[in-house]
Amino acid sequence: MKRLLAFFIISALLFALSACGSDAPSTPLVDVGASPALSGADSVGSDAAAFNAENGKTPAARVDDTAAAVYNGTEGITLYGAAAYTNTGDCPITIESAVFTFTAGGETFEHSFVPPLAEYAVLMPGETSFLTAWVPQASETALSAGMEVSLSVSLTPRRAEAARTLLLVDRLYLADNYPNFTTLSGRITCAGALGCEMNIIHIGFYDAEGTFLGAWYFTKNTLLEGEESKNFVVQMHGLPLDSLAERANSVSAIGFGFTL
């Protein structure tokens, strides 16, 4: 939750049409394409009764890929984990809880959590999204940065009871233009007639062979009217994926809007 609060505090500063006024070294942006086209079932609605009547009642989610790392973060040695998951049920779902189980150095580390703003991240059947977790370790940990780590993930999906505000994410670019992190830029479009004041965006990164490299999420407390588009720039501090712009061949993204 510390990460989530930090995102809201700095989001007004980061959300801009371009990275104007930056002193970063000038390097080419790497075009990683757009998020996949979404189906007609992705339209926005506000009638909960109609929403529930049109969908099934069996929630299910499949974990497709995982990625993990141990690195030296701002709070010391930190476990990083990411998962790609797909709605395999017959109804819209949200993720009620997730369990990330890391194995490193002959030890197991279990982290249970409720995904941030999970109630707004409604997935339709067949859609894919991402979960990400950072788990700082005690100062006396036997873990060390760069050591081999594996991750298994268990999810508890539940049937979504309300319609969503879908955000489309495209024109995505990665730039390794800072020494310690990668910059992501792109465009967010509010799909449908309803707007939103805030949002959460989930991003997954893949290499040329389709291997899942990891994931990231961010929030922006900016107003989006229905069908409106806005560009964004976000600096991915704390993402332990070196030379991501060089390694990533494609990106999958999905976003959800909400009003508090």
Image (cartoon, rainbow, N blue to C red):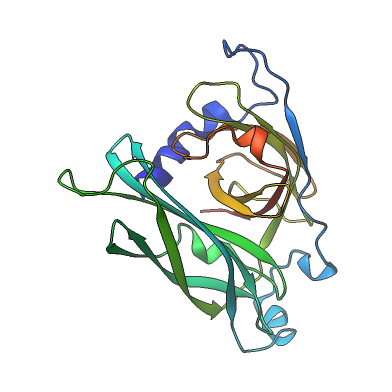
Of all residues, the one furthest to the bottom in this rendering is: 57
Residue 10 position, x and y percent, is: 47, 32
Q: Is residue 119 above or below residue 258?
A: below
Q: In the visual, does 47 lie left or right of 178?
A: right
In the foreground, 164 or 156: 156
Q: Residue at x 51, y 70 (%)?
A: 95
Nearer to us in this view, 126 or 67: 67
Residue located at (52% from left, 66% from top): 119
Locate residue 258: give its quadrant.
Answer: bottom right
Q: Residue furthest left?
A: 140
How many marks the image carries: the answer is 0
Q: Position of residue 110 (x, y in %)?
A: 31, 66
Q: Depth check: 115 or 79 in front?
A: 79
State which quadrant residue 33 falls in: top right
Q: Is residue 84 visible?
A: yes
Residue sitting nearer the eye, 115 or 43: 115
Q: Is residue 160 visible?
A: no
**Percent from the top left, x then y, of residue 242?**
53, 34
Percent from the top left, x then y, of residue 12?
53, 31
